Image (cartoon, helix red, strand yellow):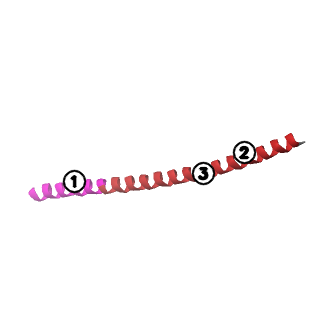
Amino acid sequence: VQRWERLQGEKAQLEQSFERELKGLQKEQQQELKALQERLVEEHTSEIQRLQQQQNSHLEQLRSQHQEQ
């Protein structure tokens, strides 16, 4: 009986340890996902700005060519 009780206690400790580890990993994963989302938004915004500048530059070139004609 004592052995069974000891094993039950060890099992409970292992389960608690597992739960703590799992929660820690889930929190870490959420933080990594948030950082990744923020990075993707920044890259997307940067790419949009780059494309807008490229388009504006191209429009200016076309205007200059049109005025020269």
Image point (68%, 49%), residue name = 19
Magenta segment includes 68: yes
Q: Residues within 10 Å of mark 1 (few under 14, many from 20)?
A: few
Magenta segment includes 51: yes
Residue kind at label 3, given as amino acid type: Gly
Q: Do the residues labelled 3 and 1 touch (CB within 8 Å)?
A: no
- Outermost residue, left side: 68
Tell me the number on the disc at residue 24.
3
The residue indicated by pointer 2 is 14
Q: Toward the viewer: 19 or 33?
A: 19
Residue kind at label 1, given as amino acid type: His
Callout 3: helix, strand or loop?
helix
Callout 2: helix, strand or loop?
helix
Report the Cα–Cα distance between label 3 and label 2: 15 Å
Q: Magenta region: which residues?
A: 50-69
- Outermost residue, top side: 3
Compared across the picture, whether 25 is left or right of 13 comes to left
